[in-house]
Amino acid sequence: MTISLPVTVSPRLSKKASRHLKERFIEFLLFGAAAISVFTTVAIVYVLVKESWNFFQHVPLSDFLFDTQWTPLFDDAHYGIMVLLSGTLTSSAVALVIAIPLGTIIAIYLSEFASFRVREIAKPFLELLGGVPTIVYGYFALTLLTPVLQILFPDLPGFSLLSAGLVMGIMIIPYVSSLSEDAMRAVPMSLREGSYAMGATRFQTAVKVVMPAATSGIASAYILGISRAVGETMILAVAAGMQPNLTFNPTEPGATITSYIVQVALGDLPHGSIGYQTIFAAGLTLMLMTLVFNLIGAWLRKKYREVY
Amino acid sequence: MLKPVTLVTPVTASAPGDDVAPVLKAEVKALDFYYGSFHALKGVNMPVYDRKVTSLIGPSGCGKSTLLRCFNRMHDLYPGNRYAGGGIVLQPDNTNLLSDDVDPIEVRMRISMVFQKPNPFPKTIFENVAYSLRVRGMRNKSELEDRVQSALKGAALWNEVKDRLGELGANLSGGQQQRLCIARALASDPELILFDEPTSALDPIATASIEELVMELKERVSILIVTHNMQQAARISDYAGYMYMGELIEFGVTDQIFIKPQKKATEDYITGRFG
C-alpha cells in the first residue's frame, strides 16, 4: 500500500535559514569555550613531557626515582625525587589527619544535627576559611602556630613540615566539610525517616544510614582534599623551610615538590639548564600523582554511586 | 486538658469472623495537631485494636498520614510541628505516647513503620533487616541470623532472597523492596506496625502480595494502614476510619463503613460522589 504525502511545505512551516545560522553560531561559541580547557590541558602536558624528556636525556630515570639526595644546584648534583616526595607526603599526611576527621565531623553536624539557624551562620564562616589566601595561612603558621608548637616541643625548628601541615589541614577543612555535607544533605529524607522509624538515634542514623548513602560524594570530598594538600605551595614555601630533606618526620623542615618549583622558578637559573629542567620533571611527577588521585576518585564514585 | 471522649461508633461492634470482643491496643483521644499554624488534626478519637487491621481512608490532605505519623512520633523530627492536646494511649502500658516524658525512640522501638515508597538502606539485604536489631545493640551473630531469617520469612521474602543476602537491598524489585521494608519493620518484634500507603508505588501483582502479607501479619501484630485505595481498605481491614479536613468523620467495622455508612459524607466519599 502506498500513501501519498504532500511534497510542498507551506511558508509557515518552512525552515528558516537565519535560525539555522544562529544555532550554528551559538554551537560554535559553546564548542570554543569547551575547547579552550581541553587545549590548555593538552598544552600543559605537552610542555611538561617535552621538558622532562630533555631532563631525562641527562639524568637516568633510575637516579631520579631512587637517589636519596636532591641537590640539583650543587656541583655534585643529585636528582632523587624521593626527597621532595617525602616532604610532600609528610606534610599532606599531617594536613589530612586534621582535615578529614574534622571536615567529616563538621559535615555530620551541619547536615544532621545543626538547626537551620546554626547552619546559616556557620556555613559562611566555614566558606570564609577556604577563601583566605594561602600566603596568609603560611604566615599564620610561621608567626603564630610555630611559636605555640615550640612551647610544646622545645626542639621544634623555626621551619617544620608539622606546622605547615597543620595549617594546611585547617585550610582544607572547608573543602572536605562542604562537599561531604552537600553529599549527605542530598540523601533523601525518606531514608532518614526509615532509620528513625526503626528506633535509631540521630547519631546512628547519620553514621549507619546517611554516611553510607553518601559514600561516593564523601569520597570525592576526601580526594579533593588530598589533591589540595599535595598541590598546596605557598604555606609550605613560607613555613616548611624549603630545605630538601629525605624524612617522614614532620618535626623536621623539608621541601615539597611544589615549594621546590617556587624556589627555582623565582631564582635566576638560566633557561634550558638541567637545574631549570628539574622543575618540569618535578611538575610532571606532581601531575601524575594528582592524576592517580583523580582516577581513584572516579573509581570510588562509580563503585559507590548513589543507590537510593 | 483532655476533652471529654466520645467514640464515634460503639466499640462493641465485633469484626467479621470473630466471637470475642476486640482488645484495645491503642486509643487516640481528643488529639489536636498543628503543622506550624495549620490545624491538621482536630479532636480525633479512634481506637486501634490488638491484632486487627485498621485502615484510614479519606481524600488527600485529610490528615490520615498525619494521624498515622503521630503514632511513632515521626513529627518530632521536624521543627514547627506541635501536638496540641489530647493524646494516644498505648495499651497495656496505659501510657500517653505523646507525653513529653515519653522517649520517641522507645516508642519507635515498639511501633514500627512501612513507608509509601520502598526505602531500603544502602546496605545488604541482611543488614537492612538486621538494622533495627543492631540499633538496639544486638551483636550476637547467630541470634541476628535467626531473627533476620524469621523476619524475612514473616515478610514472605525468604525464599526469594535466601541465596543473595549479601546483595544490596536496592537490587531487588519494587515489590520485593517493600517486603524487605516490612521484614525490617518485623525484625524487632513490634507491637504495632504503621503502613503509610504501602502499595501506592507498586504494580497490581506486588500490591496483591503485600495485601496478602498484611492479612497474615495480623495474627501476630496490630496494624494501622493508610490507603488511598478504597478497595484495598475494604479487602484487608477489619476496622476503617474515614477522615476529612482533619477530623475523623466515621469509624467502625469495615463492612459497616462500606455497606451501611452512618454519615452522609462517608457515603458520598465511598460511592465516589466526592473525592
Image (cartoon, coloured by chain):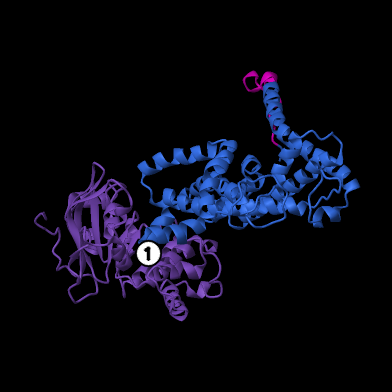
Tell me which secondary structure the magenta stretch mostly adopts.
loop
Q: Residue at x 49, y 37 (%)?
A: A128
The tint of chain A in the picture is blue
User: Quick check: can you spot residue A22?
Assistant: yes
Q: Residue at x 43, y 48 (%)?
A: A110
Q: Residue at x 35, y 72 (%)?
A: B217
Q: Is residue B271 left or right of residue A91?
A: left
- In the figure, B172 relative to B262: above or below? below
Residue type pointed to by label 1:
Met
The span shown in magenta is A3-19
- Neighbor class of circle 1 (other Cα within 10 Å; few <14, some 14-19, many 20+) is many
Q: Is residue B112 left or right of residue A228?
A: left
Instruction: Give the quarter of the figure containing the N terminus of chain B.
Output: bottom left
Q: Note the chain letter of the purple one.
A: B
Return the x and y of residue B184 as percentages of the image width and height.
41, 67
Return the x and y of residue A202 as percentages of the image width and height.
38, 58
User: Quick check: can you spot residue B115?
Assistant: no
Chain of the residue under label 1: A
Return the x and y of residue B120 as percentages of the image width and height.
47, 61
Q: Residue at x 54, y 50 (%)?
A: A150
